[in-house]
């Protein structure tokens, strides 16, 4: 089935982007460090100096 | 030939039989959509494995040799019968056609999306393979009852009930039969986590089909499934050895098939309509024997059908009748046979429970607005407004996943992740206003969602039943993405970047199930694959389980006493070699009588564990070890019984 290709007015696009960024910031305030925690652990294993580098 | 090679050969034969039979059946049930034909093929493969496993298991044949030999006989029959042989001859041509169509779609995608997809699929496959290979099962309910069933069946070679305080072994167990297929050939749990992967793939293919049916372009549909595929709750659950991802896959498959059927009724022929309905029925029956909460999801499915309107439904009925009339005798027999297999898978567990206990939903009861249908004390599922209120209040607290990490049991979080909250929510708001077709999907899925909240017990862990809901946000985003054509290159690129970022963050949090630290990985990786035991991985495991592993010698029988939510599975060991027997530690018995009781049932050792056995049992055994020389402490929680 073909997609609908019409666009949205500028103000809707601006509002959507603002809401999206706000939602990501809202979600990220609790989840960012948790999401990167394991990658950080692995990075420290590979390069032990990283923890002192990042304080 | 060494034993491992023989076991692998038997597994290969069984897999070939499953794929061949499923291919032949799926060819007779073509739906008019290539994606849904693949979904049907996957569902039918699971039906074949489960039906084969259930029949063999009930007859006492849950063994690699029985599976392998019966599969070999099946393959020979499929090869000898001209009609099935001719169908199998179509396989290479269909693979070529499928490959060509996939490559055509892929080649038309923008370059960045092609790279993103290739990278995502590769990393996803590596992640799955590594986690399955590196870690033993560790999720709570799996260690309590899902895998306890699997271990007992494989150890005894028979699907049966057995004496244990874990009464949840009575619950519908199609998933467990499937999981047993992943463990019986090697007689080991090394790859049992892979049993969730077919369900994960079914869920993704269904999401693709839903997105396409609601008008998303291929590029937008790929973004939709990328967003949904990385939903932490789903991704973590896929290899978590529980049955919830299967329910998510089956539910989404049913929605996708009905949506396809109702939106394309005008162009589908009578046979395709009938085929779609048959696969929907089979999927629902497979789901009914997997988890009883299918009933809670059905109102949303019914709403989707009813919203098609009276004219469409009348046309659907007429076309189905006409499809039935067109069937020849062999096809009718095949359909009846398939229906009977479906009824067996959908009904066996509940009928068994009804006959044994008088309650088909045992160990759970049912209460509707205060009226008992089947009473089971605090395990009674209540359908009530109060429950909806309590669950909505819990959802409010969990919304945004702020209360804790995203890990398998989803404690006080939804697990819906970065993509759903970051991009999906706004897109849903937009799509609800601007896309009529989306409103249909939203209404159906939200109805299922609310009916779940109407009835499930309010608890910290009940969001695992709702891992399918983020599809709503993913499809909404797909529709939104297609509307960005007039937004300018940078605007579109911003959203594309946000997709990559949110999916990557979702993926990052699931690399270790949000739970396993590097030390635990190291602990497992320093052991050979065959010695990676659930009892050793101390994420949620008291040390008593490892003591049992070390202290109880081969050939000895271990008597255990744990509560209704305690772990039994780790005691079986990864190769299901440990003989177990339930020995309740009764406080009114003298220590010598307790030792007599243990010996009389064949137990050489007794086992209790803090947090899994009652405090009274734990302290009683401690006391007995001090009072009598017939019960000798060998390590915390492990006692040898003498004399």
Image: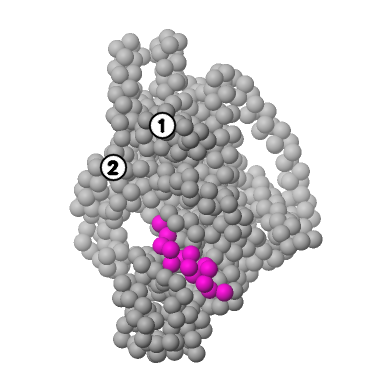
Which residue in the structure is indicated by mark 1?
A52
Task: Find the magenta span and give its range.
Answer: B540-553
Nearer to me, B242 or B579: B579
Quadrant holding the N terminus of chain B: bottom right
Instruction: Residue A5 in the image: state x and y as whole percent.
Output: 45, 16
Question: Is residue B327 rendered magenta in the image?
Answer: no
Label 2 packing within 10 angstroms: few (<14), some (14-19), many (20+): some
B286, B515: nearer the viewer: B515
Q: Secondary structure at mark 2?
A: loop
Q: Is residue B74 depicted above or below B196 in this figure?
A: below
Residue underneath mark 2: B403
Q: Secondary structure at mark 1?
A: helix
Residue sitting at x 55%, y 71%: B578
From what the image shows, is residue A11 above or below residue B305?
Answer: above
Disc number lying in front (1 or 2): 1
Q: Quadrant of residue B101?
A: top right
Residue A33 image position (x, y, % from top left): 36, 34
State how far apart marks 1 and 2 are (Cα).
Answer: 29 Å
**What residue is at 48 percent from the left and 68 percent from the top?**
B547
Does the rendering let one see residue B424?
A: no
């Amino acid at each position: 089935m073909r997609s609908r290709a019409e666009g949205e007015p500028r103000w809707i696009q601006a509002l959507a982007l603002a809401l999206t960024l706000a939602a990501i910031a809202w979600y990220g305030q609790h989840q960012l460090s948790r999401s990167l925690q394991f990658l950080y652990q692995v990075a420290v294993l590979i390069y032990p100096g990283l923890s002192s580098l990042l304080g | 030939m060494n034993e491992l090679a023989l076991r692998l050969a038997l597994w290969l034969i069984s897999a070939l039989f499953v794929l061949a039979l499923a291919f032949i059946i799926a060819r007779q049930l073509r739906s008019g959509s290539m994606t849904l034909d693949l979904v049907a093929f996957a569902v039918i493969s699971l039906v074949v494995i489960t039906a084969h496993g259930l029949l063999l298991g009930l007859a006492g044949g849950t063994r690699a040799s029985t599976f392998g030999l019966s599969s070999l006989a099946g393959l020979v029959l499929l090869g000898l019968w001209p009609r099935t042989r001719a169908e199998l001859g179509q396989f290479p041509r269909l693979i070529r056609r499928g490959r060509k169509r996939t490559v055509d779609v892929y080649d038309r995608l923008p370059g960045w999306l092609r790279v993103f997809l290739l990278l995502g699929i590769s990393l996803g496959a590596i992640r799955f393979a590594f986690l399955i290979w590196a870690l033993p099962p560790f999720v709570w309910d799996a260690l309590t009852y899902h895998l306890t069933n699997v271990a007992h069946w494989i150890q005894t070679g028979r699907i049966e009930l057995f004496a244990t305080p874990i009464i949840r072994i009575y619950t519908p167990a199609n998933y467990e039969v499937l999981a047993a297929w992943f463990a019986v050939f090697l007689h080991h749990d090394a790859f049992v986590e892979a049993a969730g992967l077919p369900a994960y793939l079914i869920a993704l293919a269904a999401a693709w089909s839903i997105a396409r049916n609601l008008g998303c372009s291929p590029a937008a549909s790929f973004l939709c499934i990328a967003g949904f595929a990385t939903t932490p709750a789903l991704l973590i659950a896929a290899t978590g050895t529980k049955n919830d991802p299967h329910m998510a896959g089956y539910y989404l498959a049913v929605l996708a098939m009905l949506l396809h059927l109702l939106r394309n009724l005008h162009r589908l022929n009578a046979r395709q309509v009938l085929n779609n309905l048959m696969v929907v029925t089979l999927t629902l029956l497979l789901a009914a024997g997997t988890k009883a909460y299918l009933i809670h999801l059905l109102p949303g499915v019914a709403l989707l059908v009813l919203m098609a309107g009276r004219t469409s439904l009348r046309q659907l009925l007429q076309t189905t009748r006409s499809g039935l009339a067109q069937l020849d005798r062999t096809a009718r027999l095949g359909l009846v046979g398939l229906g009977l297999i479906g009824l067996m898978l959908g009904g066996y567990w509940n009928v068994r429970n009804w006959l044994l206990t008088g309650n088909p939903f045992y160990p759970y009861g049912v209460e509707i607005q205060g009226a008992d249908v089947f009473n089971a004390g605090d395990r009674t599922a209540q359908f009530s407004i109060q429950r909806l209120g309590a669950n909505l209040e819990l959802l409010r607290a969990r919304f945004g996943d702020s209360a804790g990490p995203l890990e398998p049991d989803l404690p006080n979080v939804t697990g819906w992740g970065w993509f759903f909250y970051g991009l999906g929510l706004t897109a849903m708001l937009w799509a609800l206003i601007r896309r009529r077709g989306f409103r249909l999907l939203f209404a159906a899925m939200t109805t299922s969602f609310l009916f779940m909240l109407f009835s499930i017990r309010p608890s910290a862990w009940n969001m695992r039943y709702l891992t399918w809901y983020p599809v709503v946000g993913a499809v909404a985003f797909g529709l939104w993405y297609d509307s960005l054509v007039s937004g300018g290159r940078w605007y579109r690129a911003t959203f594309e970047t946000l997709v990559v970022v949110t999916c990557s963050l979702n993926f990052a949090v699931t690399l270790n199930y949000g739970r396993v630290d590097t030390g635990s990985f190291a602990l497992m990786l320093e052991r050979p694959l065959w010695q990676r035991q659930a009892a050793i991985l101390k994420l949620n495991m008291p040390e008593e389980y490892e003591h049992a592993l070390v202290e109880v010698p081969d050939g000895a029988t271990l008597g255990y006493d744990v509560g209704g939510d305690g772990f039994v599975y780790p005691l079986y060991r990864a190769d299901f070699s440990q003989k177990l027997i339930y020995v309740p530690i009764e406080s009114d018995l003298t220590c010598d009588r307790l030792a007599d009781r243990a010996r009389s049932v064949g137990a050489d050792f007794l086992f209790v564990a803090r947090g899994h056995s009652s405090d009274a049992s734990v302290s009683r055994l401690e006391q007995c070890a001090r009072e009598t020389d017939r019960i000798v402490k060998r390590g915390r929680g492990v006692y040898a019984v003498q004399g």
